Image: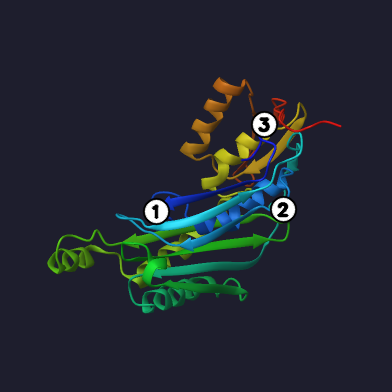
Amino acid sequence: MNLVIIVRLEITFSGITNDSKDPSIDTFRSTTLPILKQFGVPAEGLELKIESRGVAPKGGGEVVLSVPMVPNSLKAIKWVDEGLVKRIRGVSFSTRVSVQFENTMIHAARGILNPFLSDVHIFTDHKAGAQAGMSPGYGISLVAETTSGCVISVDTAVSYSRGEDDADLEDDRKDLIPAEEVGEQIASALLGEIKQGGVVDSTHQGLLFLLCALCPKDVSEVRVGKLSPYGIEALRHIRDFLGVKFVLKPDASTGTVNLMCLGSGFQNLSRKVS
């Protein structure tokens, strides 16, 4: 976040944009940025542009992140109403492989999601040439939007570890998860995140806690589903480095957890005060 400088930030990142280990660039754009807006980061000028995609092992992707300067400080929030899911959006991608992989994933995902909700739209983003990076692969990202403005996301990617010759590539293909199974798994994962409850998915718990801790010396209250291992470690680091402790109140009726904290009072000291 551009919290401590006095100019708008624009930076280009190169490398892997989609893999199965970390949140993808699509999740960052559809879910992470909206979470920042909840805490007062200006919407104008906050964007992420995908110039090219890159999957493991060779990457080759490129994205441009633009972040405006935030006010003197973030704003404390009370964010406990997850609402009801009103629509599901998503994007599939493929690089240096047939676009049919995307169609298969989308069909499989919709087969699981449509019985619950009719408003499901998953877009395709097939890349070729320089925009396809240096390794072949495919993947999909799904986002559930709720009536209270929450966004719950999941994503995954499959890539070939291209060897020195075509024989190595053929061996890799035998070990890959079929596109149909990828679509089914990611749709089931999204339903699992929705079932857990909370205003963010398990991947974004750590970011949510950090933003609360960086707020002014005022009380923030948020609700999450079952605490993830990453979320628990984030709470420990926030306690050790920022001196902020959270009060946890589990709700047995919903399986969610309410967390409250007093912000550390972090401020953008580089911003001019009139």
Tag 2: Cα neighbours inside 10 Å, few (<14), some, or many (≥20)? some
Which one is nearer the viewer's eye here, 70 or 121? 70
**Can the viewer see residue 49?**
yes
Q: What residue appears at the point 41 percent right and 74 percent down from the top-left corner?
A: 102
- Secondary element type, mark 2: loop
Relative to the observer, which residue lies in front, 197 or 267? 267
Q: Residue furthest right?
A: 274
Specify the amino acid type for callout 3.
Leu
* Rendered location of residue 2, percent (x, y): 64, 40
**Residue 214: which numbered mark, if any?**
3
| Mark 1 lies on residue | 16
Question: Which residue is farthest front?
Answer: 7
Assign a secondary structure to mark 1.
loop
Q: Amino acid at mark 2?
A: Ala
| Structural distance between the alpha carbons of marks 2 and 1 | 26 Å
Image position, residue 93 (x, y; %): 44, 68
Using the image, tell me which numbered label, if any, was put on residue 43: 2
Residue at position x 70%, y 37% from top?
6
Local crowd at mark 1 within 10 Å, few (<14), some, or many (≥20)?
many
Location of residue 180 by image quarter: bottom left
Looking at the rendered structure, the secondary structure element under dot 3 is loop
Amino acid carrying mark 1 in the image: Ile
